[in-house]
Image (spheres, rainbow, N blue to C red):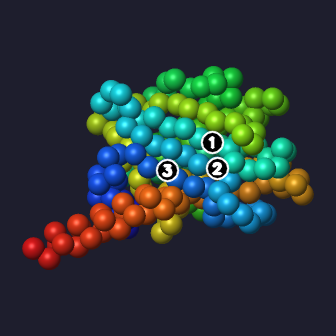
Amino acid sequence: MKRAYSLILLCAVGVSANAYTFNFVNNVTGNYIPGSAWATLDVVDGANAGDVDFTLTHLATSPAQKISEIELSMVTYTAVTMSNFSPAAKFQSMSQGNDAITDAGYKFDVSIAFDPANPKKIAPGDSVSFTLSGAGISAASFSALATGSTDIYAMAHFNGLPDGSSSKISAVPEPASMAALGLGLAAFAKKRRK
């Protein structure tokens, strides 16, 4: 199932030149504050083959809210290395493996944890960027749904909600990426008819 949905999004990402944005908007666990996206994740092919550049931007408005971790799925798991993490002080650790990270009942391939100490946390208005590198990977490699999900591509853990709780928020493609997804679906359907 994961691969079927990934194939559809892979077709769409191919149409959009391997660059897309995910908006973290859907509550998975914990308390939820409705409104616009809590964060965005831009995923773009890097300058070198096998490099993928990521930029995570925290959009929430409460100054206490911090992002402590993001989790990503891959179409086909490939071991990756991280470089160019900026600002470096905000990075804590990375773990990875084929469906090796289980969170909120879903399985992911890559987890990136951010330093929980103030002032190093990723606070509202902050952005972090990093590059993941691996043999044959591209931005499209990160277009997979989490195993066990029909709508979770990535997930972020937010701490410090106004009531003191935390929440896990999933990411969905932004409208432009959804338009590309529609084009990919149409191309896929046309190809199947031939």
Asked whether 110 or 98 is in front, the reply is 110
Residue at x 72% of width, y 31% of height: 115
Mark 2 packing: few (<14 Cα in 10 Å), some, or many (20+)? many
* Residue at the spot of label 2: 39
Tag 3's secondary structure?
strand
Residue 94 position within the rendered picture, expressed as x and y whole percent measured from the top left: 57, 34
Numbered circles on residues, count: 3
Q: Position of residue 43 (x, y in %)?
A: 46, 43
| Badge 1: residue crowd in 10 Å (few <14, some 14–19, many ≥20) | many
Counting residues from the start of the chain, the first of labels 3 and 1 encountered is 3
Secondary structure beneath label 2: strand
**Quadrant hosting residue 35:** bottom right
In the rendered structure, which amino acid carries the disc numbered 3? Thr
Left or right side of 28 for 152: left
Quadrant in which the N terminus is drawn? bottom left
Report how far apart the C-alphas of labels 2 and 3 lie in the structure: 10 Å
Residues at discs 2 and 1 in contact (Cβ within 8 Å) = yes
| Mark carried by residue 57 | 1
Q: Inspect the image, locate mark 2, and give the three-letter code of the amino acid beneath it.
A: Ala
Q: Which of pointers 2 and 3 lies earlier in the amino acid sequence?
A: 3
**Residue under the image location 64 percent in, 29 percent down:** 91
Residue farthest to the bottom? 193
Distance from disc 3 to disc 1, alpha carbons, whole Å, reads 11 Å
Instruction: State if disc 3 and disc 2 touch (CB < 8 Å).
Output: no
Q: In this view of the protein, which residue sits in the foreground, 24 or 156?
A: 24
- Residue at image coords 76%, 29%: 120
Left or right of 73 on screen, residue 45: left
Structural crowding at the residue carrying mark 3, measured as other residues with C-alpha within 10 Å and reported as few (<14), some (14–19) or many (≥20) = many
Q: CA distance from mark 2 to mark 1?
A: 5 Å
> Element at badge 1?
strand
Q: Which residue is mark 3?
A: 21
Can residue 177 be seen here? The reply is yes
